[in-house]
Image (cartoon, rainbow, N blue to C red):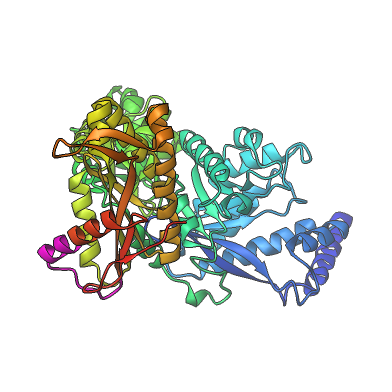
Amino acid sequence: MHHKKSMRIRANQAAEWLTEFSPALQYALQPVVNIHTGAVFGYEALLRGLKQLKLLNSHALFERAHAEQHSQTLDAYLTALAISQFAALPNAQRYRLFFNLDPHWIDPQHGAQVFQCLQAQGLPPDTLCLELSKAVDQAVYPDLGAMIAGYRTAGLHVALDDFGDGHSGLRRLYLYQPDHIKFDRFLIQGIDTDHRKRVIVANAVQLAHQLNIQVIAKGIETEDELLTCREIGCDLAQGYLIAHPQTDHAALLPTYTQVADIHQRHQREQSGDLSLIESFLEPIPPIHASEGIARLFEAMRRDKQHHIVPVLDDADRPLGLVYESDIKDFIYSAYGRELIVNRAFARQIRDFVQACPLVDIHDPIDRLLEAYSAASDTAGVLITRDGRYQGFISATALLKLVEQKNLAVARDQNPLTKLPGNNPIHRYVSRAISERNQGWHLAYIDFDNFKAFNDYYGFRRGDRAIQLFADLLRTGLEQHGWFVGHVGGDDFFAAIQDAALDAVLERLRWLLEKFRIDVQSLYDAEDRQRGYLQAADRYGQLREMPLMRCSLALLEIRPGDDYSDGDELGRTIAELKHAAKQSASGLVLRREPHGVADEIASG
């Protein structure tokens, strides 16, 4: 009796304590989207209303609850609030809710309590992903490991937030085995211009994928940050560029189309990887984990061609594979089938699911190979589109896929420099002149005085000059968002989309000057000091031939410009290249279809 009275008193105290906070608190939802398409994968719940309570942030609220011994009360209230607001979204069960834990309330039974909240709203347990911030560490909270194990038992997901900052490092990655990691904003900010950040994040992404962990780039605010994060392999994106947190949940969209639009605008070269992957994709009929074991037997009986069955959650997200070999003892034994479908046996489809690498259909083929190579004892790779099951690529098909890719690459690249050759260049130019709503800069580059150098020193040294310039194109342009190609011989091509003219000219001036200086190292000391070669010209006459430099013809295509006449475009480029050869700086620019070529001063 005394115990019940004590419980009632505590409950009343908790309710009274909450009345100070609950009217002001609500959750804003910020989309977490597929980094290729912008389709919503889930939402992070972010607490709002703290200013009304004169609290600086949610950490201050958690600290106060802890100091006043109401951490459990606050956690239970906020969990129920976030889940109920999320559940009100249309098709909420198809998305994932990312929810931050109160670092002061570490309870091994927390997973079961959250599970009950989800059940009350009619949501499956894998709807929720609990984020462990850098403040939540097992060194401080010994029960944390047991709590995470409880999450797994309940079917919840786990994410490491602020990965790469403070304690959110490799030890936590090993101990907690998260389903997702979110990079700290510090690593994402300016990643497009910071080589060290790019290397760190790229290697962390590769490590995460080898452990079958999805990577979320958090805090993306610029197009270049988004493009770089996609390029280095991040799976999901979140940030102000995509959407601000919304307290008006009716304003949330199922897809944020600007993500795909950004990739389309900045795509350097149309990749054939998607069509190749689709051609090797096997749409093996899947089953859902919520179905009974009898449904698994039926799927295997109907599909005798395959020895695996893909298993999905209720939102059609792949969980892994069931192998026929793992249940054949039950299938073929006298009483095995009856035993396994018996409710008293308490076996579910999830008990037989084996992990399998997941790769988005928009990822490059190299990513498929990397995922398969990192996995142990897997039959292949599961392919998703916007997080949903699309099909399966077997190990045998993957080898054929890589072979086809290598053949296509070899056909389309220059054998000396390994840069894209004429076919990719032609496709790029065709796209530039057909998409008239975009701005482009096309640069045609060749060497001056190369023939004399090549004849005098021989083709091996001539090849070294060509390779030197190709390396400059890679480091100076390609790594800054340019498409670069090798037409053949000493003729090259470079282009960029939607870039400011000043930035384009700055990059091209650097390229010309860098080559002019670096190529001098290929001359003998005597010729270098003299500043010219004594060599025969094309007519066989001995002349003083200046040291090599580049000539560059730059064509600016503004939105609305019409260059659809291929013959006219060819004449324009030829005129520009001739003007560049005659200019003192080696750089000329034409800014309108029927305009004149302007020489651009060097430096």
Work out whether 551 lies above or below 367: below
Closer to the camera in the image, 430 or 589:
589
Q: Give the residue at the far left of this rendering.
A: 567
Residue 313 image offset from top left, x and y in percent: 41, 49
> Residue at (71%, 43%) from the top-left corner?
166
| Res 85 quadrant in image | bottom right
Snapshot quadrant of residue 102? bottom right
Residue 374's spot in the image, x, y percent? 42, 29
The region drawn magenta spans 558-572
Does 263 appear in magenta?
no
Residue 304 in picture, x, y percent from top left: 18, 33
> Is 199 positioned to the left or the right of 342 in the image?
right
Pick whichever, 508 or 288, lies toward us.
508
Q: Tell me if residue 565 is in the magenta stretch.
A: yes
Q: Is residue 79 left or right of residue 250?
A: right
Q: Nearer the viewer, residue 601 or 284?
A: 601
Classify residue 82 as left or right of residue 420: right
In terms of depth relative to the viewer, which is nearer, 390 or 134?
134
